[in-house]
Image: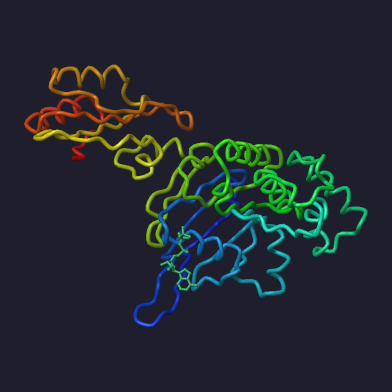
Amino acid sequence: MTEPQIQLRALRKIYPAKGADVVALDGIDLDVPRGAIHGIVGRSGAGKSTLIRCLTLLERPTSGTVTIDGQELSGLPEAKLRSARRRIGMVFQHVNLLDSRTIAGNVAYPLEIAGVPRAQRASRVAELLELVGLADRADAYPAELSGGQMQRVGIARALATEPAVLLCDEPTSALDSATTRQILGLIRDLRDRLGITVLIITHEMAVVREICDSVTLLGHGKVVEHGALGDVVGKYGSHLARELIPVPDLPLGVERSLVEVAYSTDDVATHVVLAAVAALGTDAEIAAGTIETLAGRRVGRLQIDLPDDRVEEALSRLHSAGVHAEVTR
Ligand SMILES: Nc1ncnc2c1ncn2[C@@H]1O[C@H](COP(=O)(O)OP(=O)(O)OP(=O)(O)O)[C@@H](O)[C@H]1O
């Protein structure tokens, strides 16, 4: 095992407040290996933004440690932190480019701040724009770019100082779905080519499905679930599996119940599940379902609509078939 590129230990952040203090992060442990793309998801207020601010030490954690690329940031004084932060590239939802500078000028900006000589800057900027597919827009101004192109500039700028880690805070939330896919494709491509480690904060499960190798679900400042995507999607009763493989909400008739079935074809073949449902007779029907391949795993979730008095039998047949089944309504 190589050392994790991002390592958080017992990270806590408490905001003092009149009345009760707000515990925004409540003992977060996280390991992200080099070259992985890790997603952080969670409802509004779960602590995602606080986590990003503490990761970069823009905000000092109340306790716990943040180690990036082998360096413990939480112990560094402010002056050393400034150079350590160059090892972390940041990509935001809104790119905030300097309007009066060209695209090349914007990408050069962090290099100027880092004191890179002019000649080196020019070749590095050209290289970065090539990397994000904007070599032909070097002399354009931000106002002339589309949202997707702006985000490409944001990514090029974040990569300027050759960071080990790319932190992306809702990088595609302002983009349409086709552009989102292109930007996520670019991030994946950069990871493959540069070996960079990526942490993506998002409220969009589609982003996790599309790009992440592993994912953490935050709730009330704690890690609720965590794991490789292929593992969490096959896990019974997992909140993440439910959100990653959604099934539609259904109207339900009088004296009828919904039994939900979740399985991975690693464990049970689909025809075995279907045979167990068929054995319940014509009273029970599959009202909705999703079967798909996620992170290399074939997983299924089915909603079975059946009379209330058949629920016990259904659960027993499905459990005997080796699938997870529970009454949801
Ligand atoms: N500067 C602050 N002072 C006091 N409380 C704060 C501060 N920043 C965040 N909080 C509180 O900490 C908790 C976590 O907030 P945070 O913004 O990290 O959540 P989030 O998951 O990023 O939410 P969202 O998706 O809405 O941005 C919330 O209860 C929030 O009210």
- 106 with respect to 44 (left or right): right
Residue closest to the far right = 119
Residue 107 image position (x, y, % from top left): 78, 53
Residue 129 image position (x, y, % from top left): 79, 44
- 192 with respect to 23 (left or right): right
Residue 191 image position (x, y, % from top left): 65, 41
Residue closest to the far left = 309
Locate the C terminus by quadrant. Answer: top left
Q: Residue 315's image quarter?
A: top left
- Residue for point 72% across, 51% down: 159
> Is 272 or 108 nearer to us in this picture?
108
- 36 with respect to 269 (left or right): right
> Is 323 or 306 nearer to us in this picture?
306
Locate the N terminus by quadrant. Answer: top right
Count of numbered marks: 0
Residue closest to the far bottom = 18
Residue 208 image position (x, y, % from top left): 49, 42
- Residue for point 30% across, 38% down: 236
- 167 with respect to 108 (left or right): left
Q: Residue 117's image quarter?
A: bottom right
> Is 43 or 217 nearer to us in this picture?
43
Vertical relation: 39 (above or below) 71: above
